[in-house]
Amino acid sequence: MDFTDQRLSYEKGVLDQQSVPESPFELLKAWMNEAIEQKVQEPYAMSLATCSVDHTPSVRIVLLREITDTGIVFYTNYESAKGHDIAENPNAEALFFWHELERQIRISGKVTKIDADKSAAYFQKRPHDSQVGAWVSQPQSGEVANREVMQQTFEELQAEYPENTPVPTPTFWGGYEVTIEKIEFWQGRANRMHDRIVYTQDSRNSESVVNWATKRLLP
Ligand SMILES: Cc1cc2nc3c(=O)[nH]c(=O)nc-3n(C[C@H](O)[C@H](O)[C@H](O)COP(=O)(O)O)c2cc1C
């Protein structure tokens, strides 16, 4: 297959260093709100790249569940392949691509486990059968002989925890926060002259609030 003749001109918006807000969190939330208004499908689906201690990168989609004052939160199995990567090397990068808006956002920083009580509160909010599913997928990313084995475990757990019976929160499951140390906003433009504005942590003021520096990058 050859795609060398396939190209689009991106012309839906502009991003100007002079008019971006001081805090990247403000811009991140504004872009997320626009993506929701423009009905981008699952705008909170992000690619998450991790890297093992032997320098092997891995990338997969996870769902953004919260933007906090310091970073972004997703939930997963702590004993999954990504969980092992993060335990060995906390550096990660998350990426959103919203074709409808011709926008990309890249977030990099260190990943830490969120508070266990907060993870439990979210786990208990999930649909009953998703809670059961989390117990089936243990360890996530481990090999399973076939689908029937998974299905059988699912049915056994459903029998143990029928609908309306609380499913215990697994200790191997919970949230991670990617602290935003660097975040790049990319707006596609015509002729490959794209706008790229990157925020990095600069200093902290007397109340320990981060001051952000911005730079324009060549596209
Ligand atoms: C749209 C979409 C959303 C997903 N959301 C999550 C999620 O929030 N958490 C998660 O652990 N896996 C999620 N997955 C599955 C992951 O992409 C991946 O298969 C799984 O987490 C195992 O990854 P790992 O082996 O690299 O640890 C999602 C997949 C897709 C396509």
Image (cartoon, helix red, strand yellow):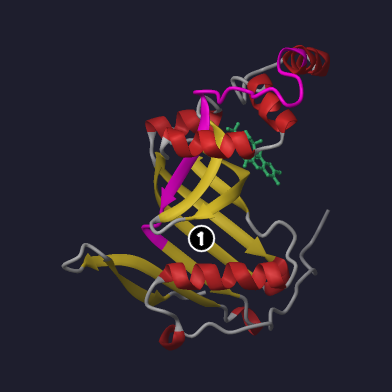
Q: Residue furthest left?
A: 206
Whether residue 158 is in magenta: the answer is no
Q: Is residue 71 above or below residue 124?
A: below
x, y percent for residue 42: 71, 56
Question: In terms of image quadrants, where is residue 14?
Answer: bottom right
The span shown in magenta is 159-182
Residue at the image point whose x is 45% and y is 87% from the top = 19
- Quarter of the image for residue 127 reads top right
Find residue 137 and report its horizontal and vertical position in percent.
66, 23
Instruction: Inspect the image, locate mark 1, and give the three-letter code of the amino acid beneath it.
Output: Arg
| Residue 95, percent from left and from top | 56, 56
Picture quadrant of ligand 1: top right
The residue closer to the viewer here, 32 or 217, is 32
**Quarter assignment of residue 125:** top right
Residue 160 falls inside the magenta stretch: yes
Name the residue beneath numbered marker 1: 106
Q: Is 184 in front, or is 206?
A: 206
Q: Count the labels in the image.
A: 1
User: Could one spot residue 51 in this view of the protein?
Assistant: no
Q: Residue at x 46, y 72 (%)?
A: 26
Res 158 seen here: yes
Residue sitting nearer the eye, 16 or 114: 114
Q: Residues within 10 Å of mark 1 (few under 14, many from 20)?
A: some
Q: Residue at x 46, y 32 (%)?
A: 85
Where residue 106 sits in the image (x, y, percent)? Answer: 51, 60
User: Is residue 217 depicted above or below 97 in this figure?
Assistant: below
